[in-house]
Amino acid sequence: MNSLRLYGRYIATSIRSQRQYPTSLIMTSIGAFAATITDFIGIWALFARFRRLEGWGFGEVALLYGIVSVSFALADGLTRGFDVFGEQFVKTGDFDRLLVRPRSTVLQLLGYELRLTRIGRLGQGILAWGVGVHLSQMAGTATSWAILAFAVAGGIALFGGILLLQATLAFWTVESLELANTLTYGGVEAGQYPLDVYARWFRDFLVYVVPIGCISYFPVSVVLGRLPVMPYAFAPALGVAFLAVALRIWRFGVRRYTSTGS
Amino acid sequence: MSHIIVEDLTKTFRVAERGDGPFGFLRRRKREVHALRSVSFSLREGELLGVIGPNGAGKSTTIKILCGILEPTSGRCEVGGLVPWRERIRHVARIGAVFGQRTQLWWDLPVADSFALLSDVYRVPPTEYRRAFDELVALLDLGRLLTTPVRQLSLGQRMRCEIAASMLHSPRVLFLDEPTIGLDAVAKLAVRDFVRVLNRDRGVTVILTTHDMHDVEALAERVIVIGHGQILADGTLASLRQNVLGERRLRIQFAEDVGDLAIPGTNLRQRSGRSVELSFDPRETPAHTLIAAIAARYDVEDVHVDEPPVDEVVARFYARHELEAR
């Protein structure tokens, strides 16, 4: 059985496990939607007061916000195994169990759980996205939608990469997870606003180091007609590149684990 | 040809220790821990090896290296022609591993679902899976457990399922790390019986680590004792016994009060009323001569000759090598 089909089996298994506790599943999802929608309402309130931010109105920012939120919700839902890696696999030694199976460790961690409750944040993201499409000057062409779909794909890869790096840290220490959270949640926050509001150095950081701007700001600017298609529509590829680098670092971490056993 | 070869295996960990004071984590000191020092042994296909030794002696490190989880600092190790840590995926597809304290089953799912998923993980073809599944279910009497979620199983039931899970892909080598820990007597016997069938009837090579000497007594023709990262003994349990505590014990129930006992070639171990326990060396004084001599002098009701319990043998061996038993 190839990896993709095995992944499908893992996910089916995970869904069956979660269905054992349906009430918890529904309540947690609703809770996540309520908590994150409050955040979005905060943005609306901000724009109701100030109208525009560095040339961006509420509709445009809602579009940015939606892309980032949808990407993050999907990445977060898919990578529960990375999230709990330090606590559930390294500390307990259960990572050994993954190593004695003839499959890649990343595949096994991806298959650990598909977090259905992330549908709450996903719902919020789709809502914000819809508001953005409705209120902004986005060109409703197939090309625009393709660019945004690519942006989400790049975003999933980027956030997946960040979460994988967070998991990799656990090979060295289980104490620095707070630092990694700064990158994930901080990244989500930062990506939800146009790059124009940030200082130069931070803008560069969000483009070249942790390319959150590349998966939100650039493609959204393209569909709003503010930046040319070339090369900005292809900026989300940097998210994929980020994931590739994260995978290399992960492999390095695994090698360290197998040589130190801790 | 040897199926498993371990030669001069050495594993040194560098452990970071916090320095003193509130900022101690900034001044970490490295300390070297020698988990294995030049361990060598080899195993033929179909052998059953018991590995014993106190906690921290190097048992788990050895098993982890053999399973491809750990890379040794130096030395050679091959299992069926593969170097475990270098060709991990190919290697682990051919071995089975049960870690007594860790589950490989999905907690919230029925046992059968875990088995099906594992057969996909190990790429077992459907017909072969069916055959292995039916066989294991029959051998381990799992029929009634298959639809039960794993979290509802007793430890003994779960362990039977764990072992079945590790055999679904019909590995030729099985690693069992403390498979009987915490099990009740009935479950222990079931596990031992099954391991015996796998080894004797199927020719599966088994490496078993345990703290339960009865596992070793029941299963292993060969035992390795590891301590301080070294192999301290490698041979049959009988030869270990011979080396460490070769004496026999003679329990006698006299039919009369015997007063002071002085029987040449024996030491008095215990006495309460008319029942006496003596120890003797069977190589100097054969048991039948001793019993005949005693029966000629006293009125004897019952006699019983026994070896010292295996736990005592091992405890004596650990003490001799200054090993801390847990």
Image (spheres, coloured by chain):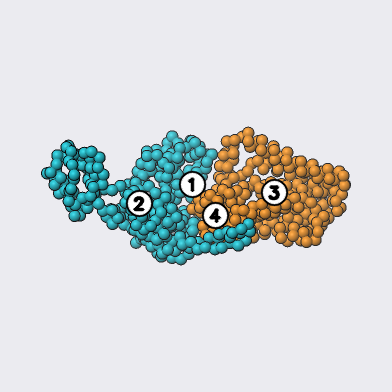
Chain colours: A orange, B cyan
Q: Name the residue carrying label 2.
A: B315
Gap between marks 3 and 1 measured at Cα: 32 Å
Gap between marks 3 and 2 measured at Cα: 58 Å
Residue A72's tag is 3
- How crowded pointer 3 is (Cα within 10 Å; few <14, some 14-19, many 20+) is rated as many
Residue B236's tag is none
- How crowded pointer 4 is (Cα within 10 Å; few <14, some 14-19, many 20+) is rated as few
Q: Name the residue carrying label 4.
A: A104
Gap between marks 3 and 4 measured at Cα: 24 Å
Q: Are marks 1 and 4 on the same chain?
A: no
Mark 2 vs mark 4: give the one in front. Answer: 2
Mark 3 vs mark 2: give the one in front. Answer: 2
Q: Are marks 3 and 4 on the same chain?
A: yes
Tell me residue B310's x, y (percent). 32, 49
Q: Residue furthest front?
A: B260
Residue placed at 45% from the left, 47% from the top?
B100
Tell me residue B105's x, y (percent). 50, 44
Tell me residue A148's x, y (percent). 74, 51
Q: Amino acid at mark 3?
A: Phe
Gap between marks 2 and 4 measured at Cα: 43 Å
Q: Chain of mark 2?
A: B
Give SS at disc 4. Answer: loop
Give SS at disc 3. Answer: helix
Q: Amino acid at mark 2?
A: Ala
Residue B211 makes an appearance in the image: yes
